[in-house]
Structures are given as structure tokens and as C-alpha cells.
Image (tube, coloured by chain):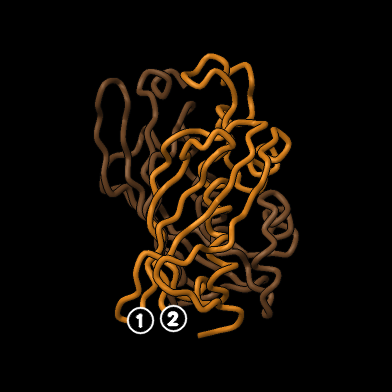
Amino acid sequence: MTTLAALEKGYDFPPVSFDLGDEWVDAYVASVEDEATGALDGAFVPPMAVAALAIRALLEHASLPPGTLHAGQELGFTAPVRRGEALTVAARIASRGERAGWALMGVELAVARGGEAVMTGRATISFPLAEAAAA
Amino acid sequence: MTQQSMSLAAGAALPKVTKTITQEKINAYSLAGGDGNPLHTDPAFAAGTQFGGTIAHGMLVLAYVSEVLTAAFGEDWLASGRLKVRFRAPARPGDTLTASGTVKRIESGKTICEVECRNEGDEVLVSGEAEVSR
């Protein structure tokens, strides 16, 4: 599998579909110990779970280079998401630069349910170029 | 306003969320999030990095901030939340983290909050701004 280090600015990831199945949602909720979303009526999924699963879907296409750091994150939620729903994530490398041996990359995400947007986001990550080249 | 959204004025503190990070929790998040970065799960690899040991995923720490906002704004957060943060320092196994927020201002139907997450040493690990329409 390729890593994000091999991708240039403007690269569009192939759209990836994923399901918010109970098993995965339960594992996510347990890992972050979220108690607030479960207190709401409606079988809602924590919004950060949508972001996490969208990123997971992308990482099945291109893995993180060793030593990758998460420098910043922007997220926008436009509709609640429930367990069992099927979503699609589209993503692109929105920016890429290099400084002092590190790459700085911006990855834009857009998650939709059918034709309805439910989440947008932008992750800013950095990774050491030497370790990425050796991987 | 939708279910369980609190009535909050400028200056109000949002409900705090406190969690203790463990390597087991980091490993569980790695499995759920599909993030195989050894910086989080491989002590030998992580020992050779600038951090000297494993650190938690930024998205794991950010989930605590989102829990604060869900507790404060309920379904409004899920339907209209916006969040912009910087990760300023790592969370390590053994750290006890407290995520919190304060209403900064209310304008045009939007509530804008400062949010952050600190460790037990009062070091800011994550800081930024959240916005929710109500």
C-alpha cells in the first residue's frame, strides 16, 4: 500500500463507502468513553466517530507515514448521523509543503449520506521526510 | 433548539469532561480508527522519536472536546457544529486530561465557544474554537 507521502497536492482519493455498523460504533464509543451521545434519543453516532471512520476508510487507500503528527483539525457537522447508516467519503490533498525535513499536508474530507452532506473537514498533518522515504 | 441543549450565555462554562489516558485506550482507539501509526502503539519505535514514548492520537483527545460540546448543546452540536483546533502538545499514557469550554459570544443565532484540553500539569494540549447554531 502506498503512503500519504507519495501523494501530491491536488490528488483526489477514490470515493470510499463505509457503514456505521453497531460493532464498529460500539468499539469506537468504548475507546473514547463517550457518555454524552448515548444520553441523546435517536441512536446517534458521536460526530467524531464519523470523522474517525472517514479517516479510517482513507487510510485503507493510503497509510500514514511513520512518525506522522496531527497538527490541526477543522470539522463541520451538517446533519446528525445514526447507527447503521451508509456514508461515503471523498477526499483530496489540498495542500502540501516541506520545511526543515518535514512535510506539511492538508487533507480535505467530505462525508455524505446519499447526496446529503453530513460532515466536512480538513486535517493538517506533518511527517518526517526521511522516515517516509525509508518506509 | 433540539433535545438536551443547554441554555448558555456569554461567559458560561461548558460541562467539563475528564479522562485518564492509558496505553490500552490508545491501542483500542488505534484498532477502531484503523490508524497503524507506530508512534501511538509501538513503544520501541516511539522511544526513538522526539516524544520519547507513545502518545495518544489527536483525534482521541479531540473526541473528549466533542463530548463537552455534545453534553452542552445536544443534537444541535451533531447537526450544526463546527470545530477548529490546533494540537499543541501530546497526551501520554498516564495523563489525566480535562476538556472544557467557555461561551465566548452569541451572534446571529450562533454560539461561539473557546475550547481546550489540558493535562494534569495544566499544559494546554488542544485549543481552538467551536461554533454551533441554535
Q: Residue furthest bottom?
A: B1
Q: Which mark is residue B109?
A: 1
Closer to the chain start, of discs 1 and 2, is 1
- Residue at 48 percent of width and 74 percent of height: B8
Asked whether the beta carbons under mark 1 and mark 2 sit within 8 Å of each other, the answer is yes
Instruction: For mark 1, give the secondary structure.
Output: loop
Callout 1 amino acid = Gly
Can marks 1 and 2 be said to lie on one chain? yes
Q: Chain of mark 1?
A: B
Residue B3: where, in percent of width, then height? Answer: 60, 82
| Chain B colour in the picture | orange
Q: Chain of mark 2?
A: B
- Residue at 45 percent of width and 32 percent of height: A68
The front one of A49 and B11 is B11
In which quadrant of the rendered view does residue B55 lie? top right
A71 to the left or right of A80: left
The front one of B93 and A131 is B93
B113 to the left or right of A19: left
B99 to the left or right of A83: left
Instruction: For mark 2, give the secondary structure.
Output: loop
- Residue at 34 percent of width and 69 percent of height: B105
The Cα–Cα distance between marks 1 and 2, rounded to whole angstroms, is 6 Å
Q: Which mark is residue A106?
A: none
The image shows residue A106, relative to residue A49, as above or below, that is above
Which residue carries the number 2 mark?
A: B134
The image shows residue B122, relative to residue A78, as above or below, that is above
B10 to the left or right of A56: left
Residue B104: where, in percent of width, then height? Answer: 37, 64
Residue A56: where, in percent of width, then height? Answer: 55, 49
Chain appearing in brown on the rendered image: A
